[in-house]
C-alpha cells in the first residue's frame, strides 16, 4: 500500500514536467511568429518559406505510404467486408526535403508526429471510398504544413509600416 502511494505521488509530480516539455516548443515558436523585426530571424530562410508557401502544391510533397484496413462504425455488412479506412504515413526525412528549412524544427512537434517511426501519420474513414479517404489524408498533410508555416513564419512587412518604424 505504501509503494502505491509513493508511485501515485511521483506521477502527480511528474505530470507538470511533462506538460512543460510539450508546451515549451510552441511557446518558443510563437515568439518567432510575432518577431518580424527580430535580427535573429534569417531573412533568406523567411523569403524561401514565403516563396514555397505561395507555390504550395500537394504534387511537390512526398507520396507517403498508404495502407487500408476495415473501417468501423455504421454501415452493416458493407463495413465488415471492405477495407476503406486509409492510414497514410509520411516519413519526416522525406518531408524535410520538400519543405523550407525554417519549418524543419517544428515538424516533429505536430500532433500527427509518431516518434517510433519518425513520421507524420494521418487516418481517415469518413468516406466509403478508399481513394477518397487517401485523398483526405493528403489534404490533412497540406493543412498541417500550412498551419505550421503560419505559426512559424511572420508575414511580409509592408513598405508603409517600415517607413513608420524608421521615423520613430
Image (spheres, rainbow, N blue to C red):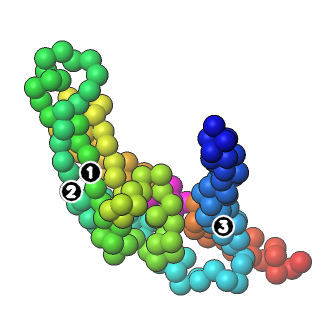
Residue 112 placed where, x, y %? 42, 52
Element class at badge 3: helix
Mark closest to the chain's N terminus, 1 or 2:
2
Label 3 with label 2: CB-CB less than 8 Å: no
Where 126 sits versus 160, above or below? above
Circles 1 and 2 in contact, beta carbons < 8 Å: yes
User: Which numbered disc flags the more N-terminal residue, 3 or 2?
Assistant: 3
Percent position (x, y) of residue 49? 48, 73
Q: Residues within 10 Å of mark 2 (few under 14, many from 20)?
A: few
Q: Which quadrant of the structure image shows residue 159?
A: bottom right
Q: Which mark is residue 65?
A: 2
Image point (67%, 57%), residue name? 17
Q: Is residue 154 above or below residue 80?
A: below
Q: Which residue range is magenta in the image?
A: 145-150
**Residue bearing mark 1:** 88
Could you say where residue 164 lies in the image, as x and y percent from the top left? Answer: 81, 73
Marked residue nearer the N-terminal end (3 or 1): 3
Q: Label 3: which residue?
A: 28
Please state, as top left, top right, bottom left or bottom right, where the N terminus lies in the image. Answer: top right
Q: Residue drawn at (28%, 22%), measured in percent from left and top?
A: 73
Q: Is residue 60 left or right of residue 69?
A: right
Q: Which mark is residue 24?
A: none
- Distance CA(mark 3)–CA(mark 2): 32 Å
Q: Which residue of the protein is positioned furthest toward the right in this rendering?
A: 168
Amino acid at each position: 500500500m505504501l509503494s502505491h502511494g509513493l508511485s501515485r505521488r511521483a506521477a502527480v509530480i511528474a505530470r507538470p514536467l511533462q506538460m512543460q516539455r510539450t508546451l515549451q516548443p510552441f511557446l518558443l515558436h510563437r515568439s518567432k511568429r510575432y518577431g518580424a523585426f527580430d535580427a535573429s530571424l534569417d531573412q533568406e530562410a523567411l523569403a524561401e518559406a514565403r516563396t514555397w508557401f505561395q507555390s504550395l502544391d500537394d504534387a511537390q510533397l512526398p507520396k507517403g505510404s498508404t495502407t487500408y484496413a476495415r473501417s468501423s462504425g455504421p454501415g452493416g455488412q458493407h463495413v465488415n467486408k471492405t477495407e476503406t479506412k486509409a492510414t497514410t504515413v509520411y516519413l519526416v526525412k522525406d518531408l524535410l526535403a520538400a519543405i523550407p528549412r525554417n519549418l524543419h524544427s517544428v515538424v516533429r512537434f505536430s500532433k500527427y508526429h509518431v516518434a517510433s517511426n519518425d513520421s507524420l501519420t494521418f487516418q481517415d474513414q469518413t468516406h466509403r471510398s478508399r481513394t477518397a479517404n487517401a485523398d483526405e489524408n493528403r489534404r490533412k498533410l497540406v493543412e498541417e504544413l500550412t498551419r505550421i508555416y503560419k505559426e512559424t513564419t511572420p508575414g511580409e512587412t509592408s513598405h508603409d509600416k517600415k517607413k513608420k518604424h524608421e521615423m520613430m
